[in-house]
Image: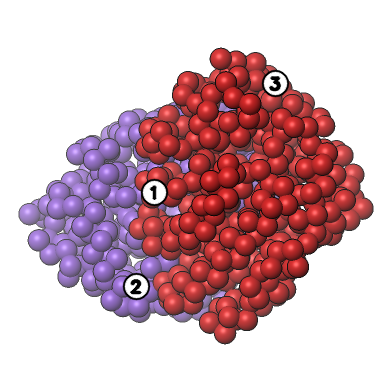
Chain colours: A purple, B red
Amino acid sequence: MTALPPFLAAALRQKTAHTPVWIMRQAGRYLPEYREVRSKVDFASLTHRPDLAAEVTLQPIRRFGLDAAIIFSDIMTPIEGMGVGLEYAPGPVIHNPIRTLTQVEAMRPLVPEQDVPYVMESLRLVRRELPAHVPLIGFCGAPFTLFCYLVGGKPSKEFSVPRAFVHGEPIVTARLLDRLADAMIAYLRAQAEAGAQALMIFESWGGLLGPADFRAVALPPMQRIVAGLQDIRARGVPLIYFANQGMANLEAVKDLPVDVVGLDWRVPLGPARKLLGPDKAVQGNLDPAVLFAPKDTLCRRIDDVLRDAGPAPGHIFNLGHGIWPETDPDAVARLVDHVHESSVR
Amino acid sequence: MTALPPFLAAALRQKTAHTPVWIMRQAGRYLPEYREVRSKVDFASLTHRPDLAAEVTLQPIRRFGLDAAIIFSDIMTPIEGMGVGLEYAPGPVIHNPIRTLTQVEAMRPLVPEQDVPYVMESLRLVRRELPAHVPLIGFCGAPFTLFCYLVGGKPSKEFSVPRAFVHGEPIVTARLLDRLADAMIAYLRAQAEAGAQALMIFESWGGLLGPADFRAVALPPMQRIVAGLQDIRARGVPLIYFANQGMANLEAVKDLPVDVVGLDWRVPLGPARKLLGPDKAVQGNLDPAVLFAPKDTLCRRIDDVLRDAGPAPGHIFNLGHGIWPETDPDAVARLVDHVHESSVR
């Protein structure tokens, strides 16, 4: 047993008294108290106002026995800080999609305390309020995922524009990914300095690439980020990589020296852990749809995930994707309690 | 060597002089002659007019050396025939989404020659025009995929409504899937009788289900369809199942007695063939994005797919997803020619 909070212990593959649990998008629209805040300000303002961002970050912590908090922000927030004009409608829409080397070079290098001071202030505010056993997670988008929005200009089902761009404009692609990697290194480092105790990198769209392209395009800037944060990691701040739709790319993700791999709900946890090896923890991966099942089905499906993850240390329970706005908060309470009760060692 | 056209021979795991190739959505918006037809009629009218549906089906056959034609229609066309009001905007929007057992029972059983005679007439028209070495493919949507549209009411990135419905309303779910399976049996059978020489079933959204739910929800109605068409299959009409986003579900698909499994671009063909076993052919799976690469890259990536598929008979070359509207038709010509040249045995 360790003195670390269960979330951090599990991330570092140490034994815990129970499996820790948190939920992607736990600060969000399924909570009436979040909708109450959002009824007064738009999404962008919420990410720019430390008092409100801190408030919505803390809301799910007050309500449920969660083992971690994640700062309320957006993966595009640091992109705004680099001088790229965008708005949320509700997904990010880029005023001038990035398609040329000139545009890539015109993006400002990110100086987080200067360009996005409100994110750092939110982290400091939340850390002050959080109970000691609930660590705070900082996050960013992975370079290829940010690239999809920046080149595509808007959310899309297939992201055909950025995916074609990868093949048609390999030089601009590589340069943009490098610049994004450097910005995310600075951004995550600043978040750790402002109080984040774990850092998560969301590769929401990496699963759009086949294995060869994933290795050639999405992985190198991720390796650059991880290499750039080894000192932070050495200080006990785990790195978590969420490989959404990642089944076909796990073989490549195995080579990425992160502490935790977040898995979507379609990846069987047992085989994934075997493939990723004993030096990586996993996070996930209940289907968010199962929160709409009757209580006994929900509990059975939670037990399935715990059993698939196995008895070895290094499992953080989570959904396999962000929680849906239509979810009943009572189902979340049930989930958190059941994970804790069912996983006592 | 066989007297069958290469496409049919490969589907039946027989040796062919070259790897056959066709392209999902080959009758579509990337062709100026298609856009010309569509400038005069809307999408729904095009599916209802046998003369025009036949014309756009034949357009890519005239232009490229393709090894198969696929009838121009939509997976929702037979659903209209069952009395469900819908329109294309551009994806299918259901006037009254199906959510109750009463609505499920109110759907008419499909009598294809009576309810969708225009589809059968299109097939007959096309068969008359096609060269002997170019077989005609009929198709339908898989029950779970149709279910996603019928319950959700409209296209969606995550299909959270139908996915929650699966867990909240298991009885309505099972009944609707059964009814859709029965309708698709009648529909595919009628297409074979009208001249379709192969039948393809599109599971566009099965990849939204994790492996356990795929087995419990999407697979049973598919098994029902395949069992209901064994006599058609015995007459030499191969069944093709397109398992989009199917990587995690291949183990389950292995148990489905179809001739060909269509694979999306993220599935490595070699391991997939090994897993599916020698009694299944595979179809796929070049990333549609690669058609935007320079000529030499495109050719190299085509060779990669051919090499991954291996020398054993039973590979039909295709994209791993529908071709994008922005694609240059010249790249398609290059692809078709290169597959033929590069795969000569």
**x, y percent for residue A136:** 31, 57
The residue carrying mark 1 is B255
Chain on which label 2 sits? A
Single out the mark in the foreground, 3 or 2. Answer: 3
Single out the mark in the foreground, 1 or 3. Answer: 1
For residue B66, which quarter of the picture? top right
Chain on which label 3 sits? B
Q: Residues within 10 Å of mark 3 (few under 14, many from 20)?
A: some
Identify the image quadrant of the C terminus of chain A.
bottom left
- Determine whether A252 is above or below B83 in the image: above
- Determine whether A290 is above or below A3 in the image: below
| Kind of element beneath mark 3 | helix
**x, y percent for residue B9:** 58, 31
Q: Residue furthest left?
A: A1
For residue B97, which quarter of the picture? bottom right
Q: Marks 3/2: CA distance?
A: 55 Å
Q: Marks 2/1: CA distance?
A: 35 Å
- In-front residue for pair A199/A50: A199
Q: Residue furthest bottom?
A: B102
A165 sits to left or right of B333: left
**Res. A90 in view:** no
The residue carrying mark 3 is B337
A39 sits to left or right of A326: right
The residue carrying mark 2 is A332
Kind of residue indicated by mark 1 = Asp
